[in-house]
Image (cartoon, rainbow, N blue to C red):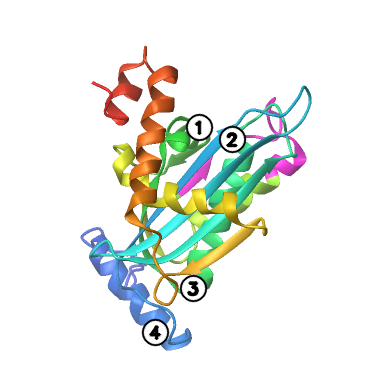
Amino acid sequence: MWRKTPKRHCDATDKDDKWRLERKLRKKLSGSTTMVFHKLTVSATNHFPDGPGLPRRGFAGGLICNNKDKWVIGMSIRLVNNTNTRDYSVSFYSALLDVLQLAWSRGFRCLDIKLGFVFHDDFWTDFSKDVVSKKLRLCVYPCSNRASRRTMIILKLVEDYLNRDWFINVKNTESIEEEAGALTVSALGECQELPKRVYDYRTDPLPPDTITRDVVRVGREIARSTFDQFPQGRKYFGLD
């Protein structure tokens, strides 16, 4: 039997869905929730372990900007992969989860999510986008070699947050300049005593521009020795 008001008509667009969800959310959520478009960039760096069998270390950063690229909220995270030392992506996914939780808890419901270079290959191997529902589905199964119990918990939580009631568009950054802000926030983690820190740039002072320029310069220097033989990496870091 035909419904008078189908859940999603075949001619409905994403804009119609956004309007419908916004109307629903404004009725039941607090005034801190916003459907205004924002950009969320996630970046991470990885360091080799201090010795054999020791966990990898690194730093990650998430940065939320408004549609004018003005910094709103950032988060620096100190990474220690003591979950699965053979799989370096676990700590990156843990950082991605922290940043998604921050964005959700602060009421952002319309985000353009850009993943930094370290996520480019692993994320689109581990997740796929359903062409009909547009949900991001986890492609890693418990029987796979890398799927320890703790790893699967983190990946399932990431999947849960990616598919909550918000409008997000996930894609890769196209150059190091696009993730420079998030890299700058991640670099702040080296100066912090706490493993995680949130910066509200509406009240906290912005880091100096010199830090961002230095982060890009150092990133290029590291990439020059690491990706010299890989055209994709050379293009991303502007080495050509």
Q: Is residue 102 visible?
A: yes
Residue, disc 3: 106
Viewer-side label of 1, 4: 1
Taking depth in this image into account, of 221 and 94 the one nearest to the observer is 221
The amino acid pointed to by label 4 is: Arg
Residue, disc 1: 122
Viewer-side label of 1, 3: 3
**Label 1's element?**
helix
**Label 2's element?**
helix
The amino acid pointed to by label 2 is: Ser
The amino acid pointed to by label 3 is: Arg
**Label 4's element?**
helix
- Relative height, residue 192 to residue 231 (above, below): below
Q: Is residue 215 magenta?
A: no
Viewer-side label of 1, 2: 2
Q: Identify the mark at residue 89; answer none if there is no mark.
A: 2
**For the magenta stretch, what is the residue range?**
136-152
Q: Earlier in the sequence, mark 3 or mark 2?
A: 2
Q: Quadrant of the N terminus?
A: bottom left
Do the CB atoms of the residues marked 1 and 2 lie less than 8 Å apart?
A: yes
Residue, disc 4: 26
Packing grade of label 2 (10 A; few <14, some 14-19, many >=20) is: some
Q: Earlier in the sequence, mark 1 or mark 2?
A: 2
Q: Identify the mark at residue 230; answer none if there is no mark.
A: none
Taking depth in this image into account, of 121 and 62 the one nearest to the observer is 62
Packing grade of label 3 (10 A; few <14, some 14-19, many >=20) is: few
* Separation of marks 3 and 2 at Cα, in angstroms: 26 Å
